[in-house]
Amino acid sequence: MHYAKYEGIVVNRRAVGDADSFLTIFTRDAGKLSVYAKSIRSTRSKRIGSLDLFSRIRFEVAERGGHRTLTHVELLDSYRNNKKALTNIGRLFELGELVDALVPEEDPHREVYELLSTALTHLSHFQTPEYVLRFKKKLLFLLGYGDRELSLSEIDAYIESLLSRPLRAPRVLTK
């Protein structure tokens, strides 16, 4: 068994059973990691507040047989201001889906981590969709998909063609 320490941002969370979850955490040095978090959804869990979506955390995992299990977590920043307005929450889910879908597992992209961290820091200050458009363009450029001049509707179609599926997050608030 091998233990490792990381710093990262929780970009996705999937429930497993009654109390467990799988987390997707985008780290500064190791890229996107999938981590099993045992009993975090139980009413007695002290870690649930630290593992909220789009929170920056410092965490430790035990690695065994290619699987990672969360052993310790420390909240660094919850980005609480971003979670107050419904429009910002929709944009958070959009940023999280883009990073989760476009960045390969365990492929370190320090520039993408810095881009996401900066976006989370400043998201509540920008009320226009151009901020998300600039994030998408910069993300595509950093991941090697080119530096094209695309409008908001064109960039979504381009990203959907890369993913071979429609984006889910932008439609969250339209239903």
Image (cartoon, grey):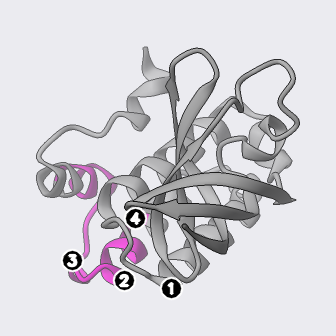
Residue to which mark 1 is pinned: 111
Q: Secondary structure at mark 2?
A: helix
Task: Give the residue drawn at x 63%, y 71%.
Answer: 3
| Depth check, front residue: 52 or 90 | 52
Residue to which mark 2 is pinned: 142
Which mark, by number, is residue 10? none
CA neighbours of label 2 inside 10 A, class few (<14), some (14 to 19), many (20+)? some
Indicate which label's residue lies in the foreground, 1 or 4. 1
CA neighbours of label 3 inside 10 A, class few (<14), some (14 to 19), many (20+)? some
Left or right, 147 with reference to 3: left
Residue range of the region highlighted in magenta in the rendering: 136-157
Residue to which mark 4 is pinned: 136
Q: Secondary structure at mark 3?
A: loop
Q: Are marks 2 and 1 in contact (CB under 8 Å)?
A: yes
Q: Quadrant of the C terminus?
A: top left
Amino acid at the residue labelled 2: Leu
Amino acid at the residue labelled 3: Tyr
Residue to which mark 3 is pinned: 145
CA neighbours of label 4 inside 10 A, class few (<14), some (14 to 19), many (20+)? many
Task: State the residue lying farthest toward the front.
Answer: 1
Q: Work out whether mark 3 precedes mark 4 in sequence or the reverse, and give the earlier one.
A: 4
